[in-house]
Image (cartoon, rainbow, N blue to C red):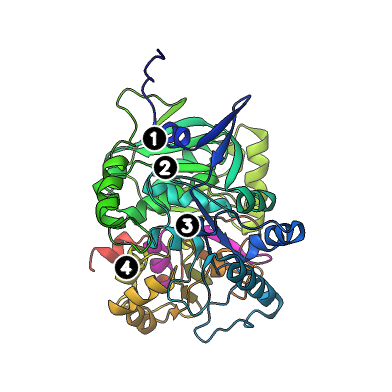
Amino acid sequence: MSAAPGPRLLVDKIWERHVVRALGQGYDLLYVTRHMVHELSSDVAFAALAKTGRPVRRPDLTFATEDHVVSTAPDRGDDSVPDKAHYLRWLRDYTARSGITSFPLGDRRQGIVHVVAPEQGIALPGTLLVCGDSHTCTVGGLGAIAWGIGTSEVAHVLATQTLVKRRPRTMRVTFEGRPGPGTSAKDLILRLIGHVGAAGGDGHAVEYAGAAIRALDVEGRLTLCNLSIELGARIGTVAPDDVTFDYLAGRPFAPKGAAWDAAVADWRTLPSDPDARADREVTLDVTDLAPQVTWGTSPAMVTDVQGTVPDPSHEADPIRRAAAERALEYMALEPGTRLADVPVDVVFVGSCTNSRLSDLRAAARVARGRRVAPGVRALVVPGSGEVRRAAEAEGLDRAFLEAGFEWRAPGCSMCVSANDDRVGPGKRCVSTSNRNFESRQGPGARTHLASPATAAASAITGRIADPRSFLENA
């Protein structure tokens, strides 16, 4: 008789459900329960299958959307970004021939892949979901395990519905306390990355826990998990609970009727066992956490919105000191500069990090009744057609338009310069996206990552701004 398994973490439980075969040396052959594809990372994979004549093994478990290269202009069409239109046509042709459910331009479900998957109930607690995009870790906020894969792996999943993966170490981050008004999930995760570094989670699957996490709605949990890759972890998770189940109830691809009841009963068994311990445990008290803003070219280069640009000469590690010096040169900032004195040219509210309805509400609360500062271009890009319609039903679009923001159509937009939404060379952008690398938002663009409320406040003032002063009178 085999011994009963010891205490297990959420990640362990889900992982073990998907092992087809242990391959040795820590590697497993895993069954993939959901697979998301988009136009920019799937063309080569589809071509590989077409060349060999292999069919898609489980087209019912793969879902496609168009997001990376699409224009977000309100009057957009397939050819609005002419040099990328072939990606859309290839995706539509292959998904139609293969029987894959697809959300093309014009479909109200179209949107950013990591927004669509939770919103449609494609991502569910306990699932193993992969996608050819590094921010696939987003959907771990529902109690799934998910990560981004390369093009050859996309082809492998399409052909076999399996994937070989080495089991990661585990890391649990406990956020103690409750942050005050004006501080969001984006600020929590930026604070964590600043604390542990951009490689602090390397080789780990991260579970986020604690009172601050339980207090988040599902959309906040998705934001938190979205930036797991920015601390070096490919997987980020939050244990499912009643908040999760209420969010998923009635979603188009979620279970219905008796199957729903059975699913919820099963999902309640997923949270980590009380005595389970991770390979690494990190605790952060966020009771007095202020809104966070990045100053450099890594999400780990972050400080309080009311803080100052740090002096690299105070950094003892020569590698980190050199990186900070390069970052300041690229960002055209001087040590000791107050962030509140840094002017901005562009503000972007959107991306798979912060383009859901709650994000737009947070930005609109700051923008309503105010005006974008002269010389600032401010864009709001909903994460999906469903988000856009819900926001318009609440009048959020009018609040933004009256304040001088642009109200756009769904897509990745300025998060990544793969379409026609770009920050100009040398221009400074406060962005709700997830990466501030050199030229991420366009050649020579300078990016400061922040929450939707901070971004909106910066658009109004024309400088990096603390949103809390706006919310006091909202």
Q: Earlier in the sequence, mark 4 or mark 2?
A: 2
**Image quadrant assignment for residue 58:** bottom right
**Label placed on residue 10:** 1
> Which stretch appears magenta?
441-460
Q: Which residue is mark 3?
A: 339
Tell me the element at label 1: helix
Q: Is residue 69 left or right of residue 13?
A: right
Q: Residues within 10 Å of mark 2 (few under 14, many from 20)?
A: many
Residue at the limit of the structure toward the right, as seen here = 51
Specify which label sits upstream in the sequence, 4 or 1.
1
Q: In the rendered image of this protein, does residue 474 appear above or below residue 162?
A: below
Query: Disc 4 marks which residue?
Result: 361
In the rendered image, residue 145 lying in the magenta stretch gets the answer no
Q: Which of labels 4 and 1 is toward the front?
A: 1
Residue to which mark 2 is pinned: 237
Per the model, the C-alpha gap separating discs 2 and 1 is: 8 Å
Q: How many angstroms separate mark 4 from mark 2 (CA)?
A: 25 Å
User: Which of the 4 image quarters holds residue 239?
Assistant: top left
